Image (cartoon, grey):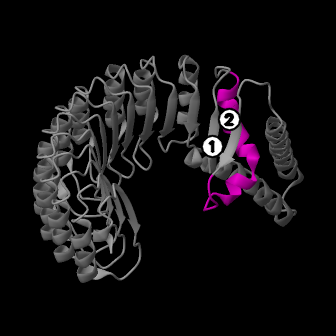
Amino acid sequence: MLSKCSQLSFLELNLQKNQIQDLGLSNLVEGIAKLTNLSTLNMILGQTQISDYGLSNLGTQLGKCTNLSVLKLTLTGNNIRDIGISGLGFGLANCILLTQLKICLALNKIESFGTSDFACGLTKCTNISTLELNLHGNNIQDKGTQGLSSEIAKCSNLSHLKLNLAFNNIFQAGASDLGQGLSKLTNLSTLILNLDQNKIHNAGLSELCSGLEKCINLSNFVIKLAVNEISDQGASNLGLLMSKLIHIQNLEIDLLFNQIGEQGVSDLMSGLVQCTKLQHLLIDLGIRDTSVLLLGQYLPKFVYLQTLYLDLRLACYYLYYKRVQSESDSEENLEDEDEDEEEEEEEEEEKDSEENEEQVQSEEEIEKYDSQEEYDDGSLKKIEVIGKKDNYDEVLQNKRCLMYVANKFQNDLPQNDIFQYQG
């Protein structure tokens, strides 16, 4: 049927969660290959039981669509291995007019060999300016990262690059090779790099940052390194990198579930304040209360910042836990007093005095939080609690903790900043 629509230039097919398997896909793409005027193709084929044979045939047939300029393929959660992704790469090498390529191969069984072969095919598409590749949840490791990086480095016309390599067993060598490859892409204006849940240490991050220093034209930068093995030294290296990317306007940094302390926060923020063109900042460092207060000291220095998004879930939860624990200790002390009524009057008077002081402090603290709930002097446009309910329900229900954190920044922030809290 599709082969008869000879004038089609735009085609989008959503076959998500069907059981078309390899045979059904092969029959489908044979028809698509006859659409000689096709310039834009979007195929959503997630969880359709496709394996290597089906993907290789898809690549072969797409290679016949020589007028394609925009291609988007979603192949999440299939049974694709190295042979399949290699075949796709070889086929796409014939699509020399491609300018935008977006491929999602997350949650398959791809390793290093297939990743390198696929990237080799991409280098034939010399007109690509936008490339988005999602390999989340495969196993490409350092060797695959090296092959991918060295080939992408040859795509000299790239201005927009999005790489999702999360959960791929990448260590220091992979991070270093990635930095070397990206250093060749001097025309990049947008880089979105997701390296969550790998095994990158400070040394690997340092070498990655050294390569990224060459990307001097970056204006939009996202780097996600949650759940790695990064400490203060890694955060310091990241801060040094940011001090050299002077054209950054939009920035997102995610270092959640690492080991970032006060020194790392200080060095990172010292670098960020040198990004004088920064307008939009999203930052999640997975830090606790003392580091949050340190973070707040730097915020007034972002004079051109228009949007500030702080993810303080861990900090708020920690503060809330401390307050609840303090109140619980007070209650336990009261119970202990009842049990120890037979003790001497002097000891009872001393305990009563201490408990009264704690109770007064607790009441004052609650009053302070309550007053901050109503605090609004116009220094921020918006204080917003957003996000789905999860383990932090108690924090969401108790806004006193949120306002405790917010108030640490509120007095000093520029008038046009927006504070958003994700719970």
Residue 141, compared with residue 157, is above or below; it is below
Residue 76 magenta-drawn? no
Q: Give the camera-side residue of 145 and 92.
A: 92
* Secondary structure of residue under mark 2: helix
> Residue drawn 67% across and 59% down?
393
**Residue 385: x percent and y percent?**
68, 46
Q: Which of marks 2 and 1 is nearer the N terminus?
A: 2
Disc 1 target residue? 421
Majority secondary structure of magenta residues: helix
- Name the residue carrying label 2: 406
Q: Residue at the spot x=13%, y=48% of the render?
A: 146
x and y percentages locating residue 135 in the rendered image: 28, 58
* Range shown magenta: 387-411
Q: Give whichever of 192, 365 is nearer the camera.
A: 192
Of tags 2 and 1, which is closer to the observer?
1
Residue 216 higher or lower than 169, as above or below: above
Indicate the quadrant where residue 249 lies: top left
Q: Residue at x 25, y 71 (%)?
A: 31
Q: Looking at the image, which is closer to me, 27 or 254? A: 27
